Amino acid sequence: MWGQPNRSTVMADIVLVNPRFEASYWGLEHALPFLGKRANLPVACLPLLAALVPDGHQITLIDENVEALDYERLARADIVGLTGMSVQRFRMREILSELKERDVFTVVGGPWVTVQEDYFAGLADVIFIGEAEETWPRFLRDWPSGEFQRRYEQAERTDMTQVPLPRYDLLKTQHYLFGSVQFSRGCPFQCEFCDIIVTFGRKPRLKASSQIIAELEAQLSRRVEIIFIVDDNLIGNKQAIKSVLREIAAWQRDHGYPLTFFTEASLDLAEDQELIGLMVEANFTSVFIGIESPNEASLRETKKYQNVRAGSTIMDRVRTVQRAGIDVWCGMIVGFDHDDATIFASQLAFLQESRILHAMVGMLYAIPKTPLYERLAVEGRLDAADENPFGTNVIPLGMSREQLREGYVQVMRDLYEPDAYFERLDRLFIHEHFEFAKSQKAYWRAHPWTWLKAQTTNLVRSGFIAWQLLCNLPDRKLRAEYRRRIVRLLKVRRDPAVLFVYLIKCAMHYHHHTMARQMSEQETPVVNSF
């Protein structure tokens, strides 16, 4: 009977799946083979969901980005769960269709089904909307009797201080470039295009410092060294995160600075020197900031008011963060209503002047349930097709759809041309002597043995990456370019830590350059970053 356990026992064999991503800005798929990894980082939700499973159930985590799916194994499970973002939705549908054919009981949660609830209609037996710390265990209690709901949604936001330690032990951490940890959820701002406030709300909720440090220690025990803090805005509650950062900085000093962090934050980070200093003390070396546009009219249009505050320019604020020793990455969007065809040159000029190496440029996209989606639906400016040749569902005002698509692709191509990219990189690393990981390096100076071990490790890793890039990269011209740039760096800065980071930047350039070239030459469809 549908909905009844396959076994006489109420204990379930549960498999949770993160579907494969297509090549994307974040994925670094083209660079990973040269770094000896299969994926950039694990999604944070799978080990957390595993920790919420009651004792007695069997739980398996499968990330298709590091291992192939075994449908025979999935067919033996009592429950197969899938999560995924919008860029994974096509693969999610393929997997669910195959599992439907095999009569497998499936549940689906995550960002995409939260905003598009009917997307997997007829394929998924149960869906979870929004956060699931309460609803996932509730479903597992309901499941043995068959008296479960087809749709679960929490009435209240999750109390982050009650979230358990994720089951990192179930991840194949050796295959990932970075680890992932979540400190908080929610963002106080109201950007029109953003689904974060739809899913997590505008009141930031943080874990306790003791929880976070327990997670860091668990990651360290798995030999993870670089961690992406996956919060959509780490500094949404500045006073609360300052307290957390102080404790993390103390933990880092006590343990010899074993971890390096990068994260996402709003541009108002630059307005709080104490907060910047605490991030440096805790060893945050990079931050992704949603800048979106140098066009202030577009920022006001999308209610990105935190970027247009009086007192200093966006450029000034970016440089404030850079001067502190934190590398700025950013998100940029083209296709706002106040954008015309001049926006593409403006975006390029801003990024070159700001020396931002890694810009996730994307066309404006309307995510269901966001204010942008509702507004454009009323205006009749949404393309209802799930797939279209333009890469976005938004019909722009200030240009044609063809102009938006071609302008976006050209920005990506120009941005990651070697001369443009390395002009930005060398201005930071060579001309301006950019200093990152200042607190970690200060600790090394006071502990020579730790410094020696760390720098030896950096040299070994640098040698491996350099060999991969200079010997195995298929593009002969890029091999020569990387060789020339590396030699130039070594004439000025012979620090093994700087060399290691510079080589990572070369590998990341190869990924971005390859994506842009393939789109420009129509080897792949237009891949929108948003």
Image (tube, grey):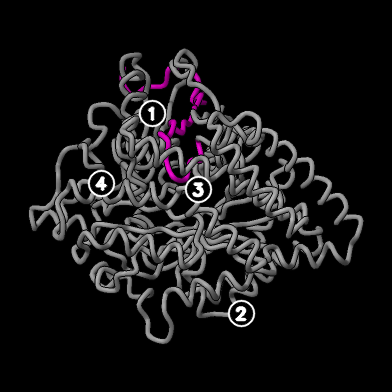
Query: How far is the residue under mark 3 from the one under mark 1?
Result: 61 Å
Query: How far is the residue under mark 4 from the one under mark 3?
Result: 20 Å
Q: Residue at x 68, y 38 (%)?
A: 465
Dots 2, 4 in contact, CB < 8 A: no
Q: In the picture, residue 497 is in which quadrant?
A: bottom right
Tag nearer the camera, 4 or 1: 4
Query: How far is the residue under mark 2 from the one under mark 4?
Result: 42 Å
Amino acid at the residue labelled 1: Ser
Q: Secondary structure at mark 2?
A: helix
First reached walking from the N terminus: tag 3 or tag 1: 1
The disc at residue 530 is none
Tag nearer the camera, 4 or 3: 3
Report the side of 401 relative to 476 (left or right): left
Q: Secondary structure at mark 1?
A: helix
First reached walking from the N terminus: tag 2 or tag 4: 2
In magenta stretch: residue 16: yes
Amino acid at the residue labelled 4: Glu
Q: Secondary structure at mark 3?
A: helix
The disc at residue 274 is 2
Asked if residue 57 shows in the view, the reply is: no
Amino acid at the residue labelled 3: Pro
The disc at residue 406 is 4
First reached walking from the N terminus: tag 2 or tag 3: 2
Query: How far is the residue under mark 2 from the one under mark 3?
Result: 36 Å
First reached walking from the N terminus: tag 4 or tag 1: 1
Q: Label 1 belongs to which residue?
A: 145
Tag nearer the camera, 2 or 3: 3
Q: In the picture, residue 31 is in which quadrant?
A: top right
The residue segment tinted magenta is 1-29
In the depicted structure, whether residue 80 falls above or below residue 307: above
Q: Residue at x 34, y 16 (%)?
A: 103
Q: Label 3 belongs to which residue?
A: 418
